[in-house]
Image (tube, helix red, strand yellow):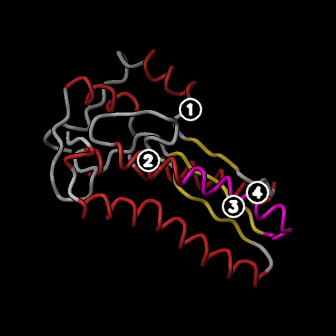
C-alpha cells in the first residue's frame, strides 16, 4: 500500500485522467450529441471514496471518485436548470472482482491483500457481468422515469448485511488458484 506522498506523478496523473477527466470529457461530448438528438442519459461510475471511505493507498483514487460524484450532481442540476432533455446519473457497482482489486493504481504494481480483506471481498464481491446486468436494468428503468441524479447501487447496505449473515452458508473464494 503506497501513501499519496510516495506515489509517482505519472500514477496520479493516470488516475485523475481516467477516473475524473475521462468522466468530465466523456459527459461533455455525450451531452452535446444527446442535445442534438433531443434526449439521452449519461451515467458515470462512482467507486471507492465517493462515500467518504478511506484506505491506505487509495487516496488519489478515492478523491477522483468523489469528484465524479460531484460532477454528476452538478450536471444533473445544470441539465435541469437549462431545460436540457438529457439525464445524468451515478452507478455504484460495489466490490467487483477484477484486476483492480490487486492493481488499483493502474501502474502495473500489485498490491498484496490482507487475508481479512480477501474474506470481505469473498462475501461482498461479485463478477462484473452479474453487477452489469443489474445496473443496466436500473438504467433502462430510469430512462422511462426521467429522474435526474439517478443513483443505482448494486451493493446496498441491506444486501451487504444479508451477505454477512449468510456468509457461513455461501462459501465463495475469488482468490483460489483456479479462479
Q: Nearer the N terminus, badge 4 or badge 2?
A: 2
The residue pinned by badge 1 equals 156
Q: Quadrant of residue 59?
A: top left
Q: Which mark is residue 77?
A: 4
User: Mark 4 Cα within 10 Å, few/some/many (few <14, many 20+)?
Assistant: some
Query: Residue at horizontal 21%, vertical 37%?
Result: 175
Please name whichever residue, 163 or 171, is drawn nearer the observer in this view of the structure: 163
Taking the spot 62% from the left edge, 45% from the top edge, the residue there is 152
The residue lying toward the viewer, choosing from 10 and 99, is: 10
Kindly report the distance in space between the C-alpha atoms of the residues bearing marks 1 and 3. Answer: 24 Å
Give the magenta part as a residue range. 68-85
Comes first in the chain, label 1 or label 4: 4
- Residue that mark 2 sits on: 63
Report crowding for label 2: few under 14, some 14 to 19, many 20 or more residues within 10 A (C-alpha).
Answer: many
- Report whether 88 appears left or right of 9: right
Assess whether mark 3 and mark 4 are in contact (beta carbons under 8 angstroms): yes
Q: Earlier in the sequence, mark 1 or mark 3?
A: 3
Residue 75: image tag: 3
Q: Nearer the viewer, mark 1 or mark 4?
A: 4
Amino acid at each position: 500500500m503506497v501513501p499519496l506522498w510516495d506515489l509517482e506523478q505519472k500514477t496520479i496523473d493516470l488516475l485523475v485522467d481516467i477516473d475524473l477527466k475521462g468522466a468530465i470529457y466523456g459527459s461533455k461530448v455525450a451531452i452535446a450529441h444527446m442535445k442534438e438528438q433531443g434526449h439521452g442519459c449519461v451515467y458515470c461510475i462512482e467507486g471507492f471514496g465517493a462515500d467518504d471511505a478511506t484506505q491506505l493507498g487509495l487516496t488519489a483514487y478515492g478523491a477522483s471518485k468523489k469528484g465524479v460524484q460531484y460532477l454528476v450532481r452538478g450536471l444533473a442540476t445544470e441539465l435541469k436548470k437549462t431545460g436540457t432533455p438529457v439525464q445524468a446519473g451515478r452507478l455504484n457497482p460495489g466490490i467487483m472482482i477484477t484486476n483492480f482489486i490487486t492493481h488499483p493504481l493502474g501502474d502495473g504494481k500489485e498490491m498484496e491483500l490482507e487475508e481479512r480483506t480477501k474474506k470481505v471481498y469473498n462475501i461482498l464481491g461479485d463478477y462484473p457481468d452479474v453487477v452489469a446486468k443489474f445496473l443496466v436494468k436500473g438504467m433502462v428503468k430510469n430512462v422511462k422515469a426521467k429522474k435526474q441524479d439517478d443513483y443505482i447501487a448494486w451493493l446496498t447496505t441491506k444486501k451487504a448485511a444479508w451477505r454477512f449473515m449468510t456468509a457461513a452458508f455461501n462459501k465463495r473464494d475469488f482468490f483460489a488458484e483456479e479462479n
